[in-house]
Structure formats: C-alpha cells, structure tokens
C-alpha cells in the first residue's frame, strides 16, 4: 500500500529520509531505508512561537506547516518535521515533547524504502476529525 518514491528526484536527503515531489500534495518526506514498527523516523527541534505570532505565520508560506503547542502557542518543527503529509491511514505518528521542544516521528507500521512517510494531522494514527483544508472523507473507522 506504500507510495514508493525510489525513482523520485530528491530535493533534500539525509541517510534515512529524503524530500521529493509527493502524489499527496506538493512535497513530502520519503523513507530512504526501511523502518520497523515503533522505530523513531526523525526527532526534530521545534521553534515555539507565542500565540500572537500565529496570525502573522498564517499570512506566510508557513501557513499550515506548524503544530498546535501548549498554552495556545504554535511550534514549527525543523528538519523535515513540518513537511510530513497527512493520511487517514498513516504509517507514522508524532509526539510533541513540550519540555524539550521536540517533535518525534515514529513508525506505526513497517515503512519500506521509497514509501512516503505520512502522519494523521489529528494527532492520532486512527484519529478522525475536521482539518483546516479540504480532503476526501476518512474511511469508516
């Protein structure tokens, strides 16, 4: 079921991940090697912005690329952290570590080399709910 991207033109690359054009939307993050269920895919530092900054960020190309943070702040993940695309059937999940200002992305099932790494933007792999953009309805739970 994976979205193989092995032949895609790589925009950026690390040993384990790369960024390339995505069939989902714009660009996405792809696995350069396999990841086992439970394995950390990436750990990203997060720049936390106070609540008033969200209004300004929404007027830039960073719109939609940040995470809701505690105390109504927003967090912009560095590394590839703000580039993971949404899926209702993701192969990864994210955990926000507010104390350390980190976003951890972990495989929720096997991810093959060449697969696009996706997360559910609701915050839970099986989550359902409204998002801030139009998307086909999620499959029945």
Image: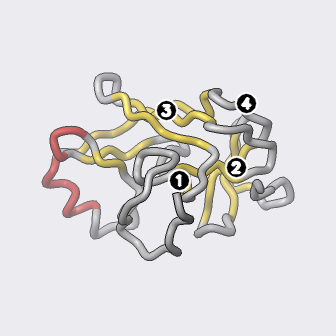
Marker disc for residue 36? 4
Label located before the other in sequence (2 or 4) = 2
Q: How many marks?
A: 4
Disc 1/disc 2 C-alpha distance (Å): 10 Å
Marker disc for residue 104? 3
Residue drawn at (74%, 55%) of the image = 10
Where, quadrant-wise, is the N terminus in this rendering? bottom right
Describe the element under mark 4 as helix, strand or loop. loop
Label located before the other in sequence (3 or 2) = 2
Label located before the other in sequence (3 or 1) = 1
Q: Residue lying furthest front in this view?
A: 141
The answer to whether 50 appears left or right of 29 in the picture is left
Label located before the other in sequence (1 or 4) = 4
Marker disc for residue 30? 2
Disc 3/disc 2 C-alpha distance (Å): 16 Å
Circle nearer the viewer, 1 or 4: 4
């Amino acid at each position: 079921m994976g979205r193989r991207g092995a032949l895609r033109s790589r925009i950026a690359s690390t040993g384990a991940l790369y960024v390339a054009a995505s069939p989902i939307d714009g660009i996405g993050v792809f696995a350069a090697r396999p990841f086992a269920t439970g394995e950390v895919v990436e750990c990203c530092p997060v720049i936390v912005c106070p609540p008033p900054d969200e209004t300004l960020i929404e007027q830039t190309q960073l719109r939609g690329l940040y995470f809701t943070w505690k105390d109504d702040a927003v967090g912009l993940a560095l590394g590839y952290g703000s580039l993971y695309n949404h899926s209702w059937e993701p192969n990864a999940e994210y955990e926000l570590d507010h104390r350390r200002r980190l976003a951890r992305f972990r495989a929720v099932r096997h991810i093959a080399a060449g697969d696009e790494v996706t997360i559910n933007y609701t915050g839970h792999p099986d989550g359902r709910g409204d998002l801030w953009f139009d998307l086909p309805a999620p499959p029945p739970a």
